Amino acid sequence: MRDLKIPGERHPEKAHRADNAQPKKPDWIRVKAPVSEGYKQTRDILKTNKLVTVCEEAGCPNVGECWSQGHATMMIMGEICTRGCSFCNVATGKPDALDVFEPGRVAHAVETLGLKHVVITSVDRDDLEDGGAEHFAQTIRAVRHRSPETTIEVLTPDFLKCDPAALEKVVEARPDVFNHNLETVPGLYPSVRPGARYFHSLRLLQRVKELDPTMFTKSGIMVGLGEEAQEVRQIMDDMRSADVDFLTIGQYLQPTSKHHAVMRFVTPEEFRDYERAAYGKGFLMVSATPLTRSSYHAGDDFERLRENRLKKLGRI
C-alpha cells in the first residue's frame, strides 16, 4: 500500500530528478495557518463523505481561508493522476476504478456545506476511454438534483486521448463555468506539462464555446516558471482568440525539492500590469495576484463574471 505522505511514494516519477532549492517566499506570499472552527467543520464534512479535494492534494496556500468559509474544491475520480507534471503535487500512478457512488457523495457535501457555487475538478484519467467525462456529467447532474440553486464550475482535464464526444458529454450536462487551465506558456510545456499539448488545450476551450456559446469559459496560468512577460501576453491573445471569458494568473509555488524550480517571484505590481493588459484585451473577468488559484474566490468571481457579461450586452 502506497503512503502518499512520503514524497518518494507520492511522486515515484520524480524520484530520479535532481533537487531544486526552494527559495524563501517573499512577504506578499505568506498565509496564516488553518486553525479556525469553520476550517475544522469543512474538513470534517469532507472526511465524513470520503471526498478528496484539490485544496489538500495540490497543497493550495489558500486552504485555510477558503475552508474557514465552507468553500472547498471537490476532486473527483480519485487522488492518483495518470500524469506527472513537474509543477503538480497531486500523486502520480495507476488510479483505482471509478466510484459510482462518488457523484452522490459530492452532491450531499455541497448540500450540507450550503454552497452557492461549487468547483469540481479531477485528476487526469488517461486510463479511461472517455477520460472521465461521463463521471463529470453524472456529478454535475447529482449536484443539480440536490442543490438546484447552486452554480457549478468544472475544472477539467484535457481529454487528450479521447474521442471528441467526451467533451460533448460534459458540456451537455451544462455546468455554469467550464474551466481548463493552460498552466504555462507553450515553450515550457516539454518541461512543465509534458503529457499535454498547448494547442489541443486551447482548441478544447474553443470547442466548448462552439458547442454552447452561452457557457462561460475560464483558463489559468502560473507565472514564475521561467516565462517572459511577452509570452504571457501572447497567451492572453490566444485565449481571446478562443473566446475565453475569464483569466486567472497566480504565482507558481514549488511543492517539494523534486518539483520544477521557482525561477522568480513575480511582484504584485507585475500582476497588476497583467490584469490591466488582460482587461484591455477583452476578458470579462481577470484575477491576477500572487495567491490567485483557479478556484480562489470562485463564487464571488462568478457573480462578477455574470454581471460583466450583462453590462457588455447592455442589459444592466
Image (cartoon, rainbow, N blue to C red):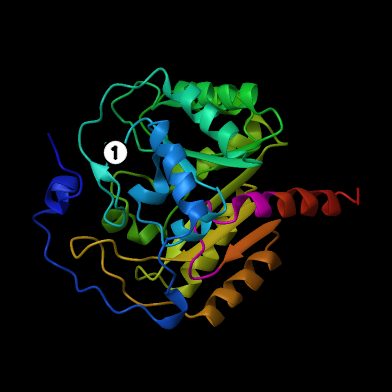
292 is higher (above) or lower (below) than 301: below
146 is higher (above) or lower (below) than 201: above
Residue farthest along the left direction in this orientation: 16
Q: Is residue 157 visible?
A: no
Is residue 295 rendered magenta in the image? yes
Q: On the picture, is 91 further left or further right than 207?
A: left
Q: Which residue is mark 1?
A: 81
Residue 124 % position (x, y): 35, 36
Q: Between residue 178 and residue 208, name the one nearer to us.
A: 178
Determine the secondary structure under disc 1: strand
Query: Which residue is painted at 59% across and 27% down in the image?
Result: 143
Majority secondary structure of magenta residues:
loop
Q: Between residue 269 and residue 231, name the one nearer to us.
A: 269
79 is higher (above) or lower (below) than 104: below
The magenta segment: 289-302
107 is higher (above) or lower (below) than 155: above
Q: Is residue 255 visible?
A: yes
Is residue 14 rendered magenta in the image? no
Query: Which residue is painted at 71% across and 36% down in the image?
Result: 213
Looking at the rendered structure, the kind of residue marked 1 is Cys
Q: On the picture, is 16 further left or further right than 103?
A: left
**Number of numbered discs on residues:** 1
Residue 226 % position (x, y): 35, 71
Image quadrant where one finds the N terminus: top left
Query: Which residue is painted at 24% across and 73% down in the image?
Result: 22
Residue 31 % position (x, y): 44, 70
Q: Between residue 12 and residue 229, name the one nearer to us.
A: 12
Tell me which corner region of the image, top left, top right, bottom left or bottom right, holds residue 95: top left
